[in-house]
Each structure stands twice: as structure tokens, then as C-alpha cells.
Image (cartoon, grey):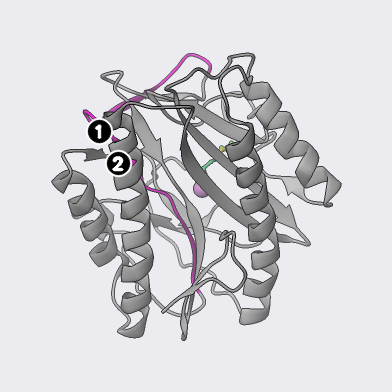
Amino acid sequence: MVRQGGSSQPRLKTRAQMELMRRAGRLVSEALAMCRRMAVPGCALSELDSAVEALFVSRGAQPLFKGYPGKVPYPGSTCLSVNEQVVHGLPGARMLQEGDLLKVDTACRLDGWCADAAVTLGVGRVSSGKDRLRRVTEEVLQLAIRELASGVKRRGLWSEVAKRMQLHAESAGFQMVTQYVGHGIGETMHEPPQVPNYFDRETLGTDFRLVPGLVLAVEPMVNMGVSQTKVLRDHWTVVTRDGLPSAHVEHTLALTADGVWVITSDRDDDVVK
Ligand code: MF3
Ligand code: CO
């Protein structure tokens, strides 16, 4: 979501609520796995979007992106962003091509509880540069999960995790996007707190302590070139200012006393201790 000013208190979740979120998370993970199989050269973005929407609806879940308020309501059930598109790419008639770097982001609500996740996929064979960008971005998210697991034990601060995420991306020669942040999630998709993937004086103002009961959608966006982005005239698609590729991955993560539950994992009971 777009970074905003101001801060407010997160609403902590019970374990029973986290269990419900896991069911939504598993469905989101199934949708992303389906997209991974479908994303071959010649596949239209609209086909991926329709398939995800049909899956959600067939399981009694609500696609959360559809109709999301903006200058124009969001038209799809997924965000499909290709190459220099960072996030919020619109699912239209565009066909995937060999070598594209595709970001698939989607979320649903099932039995009142939400889950949100994203993956970055190479279509066919991608350049080594794009592949490294994808890998480093996945490493940034895995690192965040491990740091959250150790952070919650000592009631650390989110900013300590964010600093490490930024450092990992920058050490690889890449830049973290700062205009967009992760978010709390629960009965609604976007809840406090804001979850930035970087550290500066401004993010300190919205910093928060890592406590059991927090459920966060952590979503690093990493650019090969400059960190700056702009929004296209369709009012949604976010692209890099220099036109170089970008990668984005996201998991919904629940902090508990016995570790971090990866709510949107493709595995049952995925806990990182
Ligand atoms: N995962 C993104 C976010 O949390 C996707 C939002 S798409 C929108 O901001 F359509 F819902 F805006
Ligand atoms: Co999100």
C-alpha cells in the first residue's frame, strides 16, 4: 500500500483468529501456485486474473483487490506487474513473453479473515540479472521472517528488521522502494501498522514493537536501478523511474510466542522459530 503519514495502534489477533487467517492464506497460496503453472509465453494477463477470481469464488472467498478504492476503483482480483512495473499492474490483454519478470499479487477474505501474498516469477528463461534480482528479493523476505522470529522473542522493534532488509538489498547492488510499504492485516486487508522495508528518520515515527498477536503483510519491492517510482496514467500501475526491472514478494506473517507463522505458506503449519 501507499506510504502514509500518521501512526495508530495495531489490533492484536488471538491464535484462533490466526488459524482462520491460515485458511485464507492457504487459498491465496493455491492461487499463486496456479499462476506459476499458467505463466508461460502467450498467456494473457487477463487469463491469470480470471482464473484467480474463479478459484476464490468457487471456495466462497472474496477477492479483495476488486473494486479497491482509488482514483478509479481497482479493476482486477490480482495485480500483475511485468518487468519495470513494480506493483499494481492491471490485468489486461497483454500477453506474457519469454524473459518477462512477472509479479503476481493477490488477496482474499475467507470466513471473515484476510490473507495477502505475492510472488515474482520468471516467464520461460529470464536474464541472469533479472533472476538475481528475483532471488535477492526472496532472500530479503526470508531474512525478514527470521529476524521477526528472533525479534518477537526479545520484544525488538520492526525498524531493526527493516534496516537488515534494506542492507541486504543494497549489498547486492539493488535499491529498496520506499513509496510503498507493507501493512497490518486481519478482518480487513489494510490495517495499522505501516510496515516499511527500509529505515530512515520518518519511519522511526511509525515504528512498533514486535509482540505476539501482530499479523503483518511484509512485502519488499526491490529495484535493479533507482528506487524512485511513478504511477502511470491508468492511475494504478507503478513503474520504476528509470525503466529498469523490479521484483516484489509478500507473505502474511503472524507473530506468536512460539515463532512466526507463515500464513500464506504452501505448507501446513509453516512456523519459523
Ligand atoms: N499487496 C498490495 C498492497 O497491500 C496490493 C494492493 S492492490 C489494491 O498494497 F488493488 F488493493 F490496491
Ligand atoms: Co499487501
Q: Quick check: is 163 in the magenta stretch?
A: no
Q: Position of residue 5 (x, y in %)?
A: 37, 47
Q: Is mark 2 within 8 Å of ligand 1?
A: no
Q: Is residue 62 left or right of residue 242?
A: right
Picture quadrant of residue 47: top right
Q: Amino acid at mark 2?
A: Thr
Q: Residues within 10 Å of mark 1 (few under 14, many from 20)?
A: some
Q: Residue at point 26% right, 30% down?
A: 129
Element carrying mark 2? loop
Name the side, left or right, on which 46 lies relative to 213. right
Residue bounds of the magenta highlight: 214-234
Decide if residue 69 is in sight here. Answer: no
Q: Which residue is mark 1?
A: 227
In the displayed structure, would residue 128 be above or below residue 156? above
Q: Position of residue 143 (x, y in %)?
A: 31, 61
Name the residue carrying label 2: 178
Q: Is mark 1 within 8 Å of ligand 1?
A: no
Which residue is at 30% across, 84% downward? 154
Query: Under tag 1, what secondary structure?
Result: loop
